Every structure is written in C-alpha cells, then in structure tokens.
Image (tube, coloured by chain):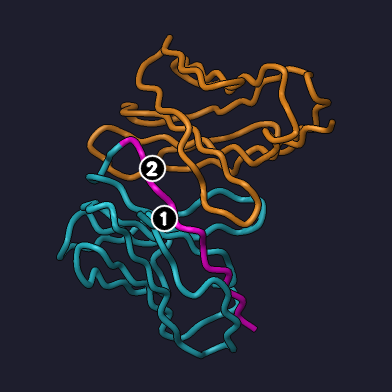
Chain colours: A cyan, B orange
Amino acid sequence: NAGVTQTPKFQVLKTGQSMTLQCAQDMNHNSMYWYRQDPGMGLRLIYYSASEGTTDKGEVPNGYNVSRLNKREFSLRLESAAPSQTSVYFCASSEMLGSDTQYFGPGTRLTVL
Amino acid sequence: EDQVTQSPEALRLQEGESSSLNCSYTVSGLRGLFWYRQDPGKGPEFLFTLYSAGEEKEKERLKATLTKKESFLHITAPKPEDSATYLCAVQARNAGKSTFGDGTTLTVKP
C-alpha cells in the first residue's frame, strides 16, 4: 500500500516550458487535491477533484490545469512555466470531499529558471 | 474569507522543556480544525481533528485544545524527534476545502 505517490520528485524548467506533474493514490479515495507550498508558508490549494470526473479551482489556479484521469490519478499541468511557479507541489487525497484526514504525497520540487 | 494565523513562526526548545504552539482562526462556521506534522522534505502527516470548543485530543507528548477563536498544540517534555513543522488548518461547514496556516517550525535540542 504505497498511499499517495508523485512523479517526478525534482524538476528544473526554463521559463515558457511545459510539464505535467503526476499523482496517484491506491486508497480508493474519491477526492484529490493539488497544493503548492512556498518557503516558510503553508499550503495553498491550486485545484481539487471532489470525485472522478469533476475538478474545481482552489485559491491559486492561474497558470495551471488539471485532469482527473480516473479514480486513482490526478495530474497537474503547467502550460507555460514562470519563475513565480517555483515551489514544492503536493498532491493529497481523502475519502470524500471534506473528510477529516487528507493523505499527502512526498512532493515535487519544481524550479523554473 | 477563512484565515489561519500560527505563532510563533519558529520555536526552539531544550529537550524536556514544555511549551505551546498557537493557531488563531476566523471561519464562517467551523466544521473542523486540523493539526498536521511536516518533516523536512516530506508531505504533511495528519495528527488531530477538533470539532468544537472545549474539545481536546492527545497523542503521546502532544495535546491539542480548541476554543472559539484559537487552538493550542501543547508539547509536554519534548524530544528531539518532535522537531518538525506543525501546520494548522480549518474547514468551514459545507466548504469541503481546508485553509492552512503558515506553520510553526519546532526545533528540540538534546
């Protein structure tokens, strides 16, 4: 039981490049989330998916797109990366939207030059 | 808009020196307040959920308490392995999403 897995662990991009961050969970959870965490700051919600087939914007969605590929997988895409998107990205899942416990992946450390 | 403020930003303790972390919040109808622990280079790990004022939860050397405006995470006789960043989050009723504070980084020296 791996929990929540994320790939890649590290990534360096040049301004304007695109990339997709992958997330998968094996807990049969309905809801999944993408957060970003900047140094010394808490987590800010980018997008979330309450259930398979639905996605909604969080606090900071600009510059990002998401796809809930199936119940297990939730990807985050940066179409044209900017230095302001340098951050650590965490994927999380929970049994339902609003469940007490969110389970987090190990994070992807992204640097945009 | 829901808001969470944690203090202090950083706390350094000697092993065995008890202290408390604070989480002040404003939310339109609290469904739950959550505490997470985050180790360097890792994702947050769930610790507690508190639902109503007066509620307390304990786990080993940690005890979380809740009032209508704030929550405290009390650490009794901490050990170096308690060193981590502690995050507080709130969730409003019918919101489904949590708002996180910036965290308190705790360092416990042997």
Image quarter (top left, top right, bottom left or bottom right) of the N terminus of chain A: bottom left
Does residue B55 belong to the magenta stretch?
Answer: no
Q: Which residues are magenta?
A: A100-113
In the rendered structure, are the residues bearing label 2 and label 1 in contact, judged by CB atoms less than 8 Å apart?
A: yes
Q: In the rendered view, does B69 fall on the left or right side of B7? A: left
Residue of label 1: A45
* Residue at (62, 19) in percent of width and height: B74
Three-letter amino acid code at the position of disc 2: Ser
**Residue at (25%, 59%) from the top-left corner?**
A49
Label 1, residues with CA under 10 Å away: few <14, some 14-19, many ≥20: many
In this rendering, position of residue A76 left or right of residue A29: right
Q: Residue at x 40, y 80 (%)?
A: A20
The correct choice, above or below, for A5 with respect to B20 in the image is below
| Residue type marked 1 | Leu
**Looking at the rendering, in which quadrant would you find the C terminus of chain A?**
bottom right
Q: Which residue is mark 2?
A: B98
| Residue A75: percent from left, percent from top | 34, 72
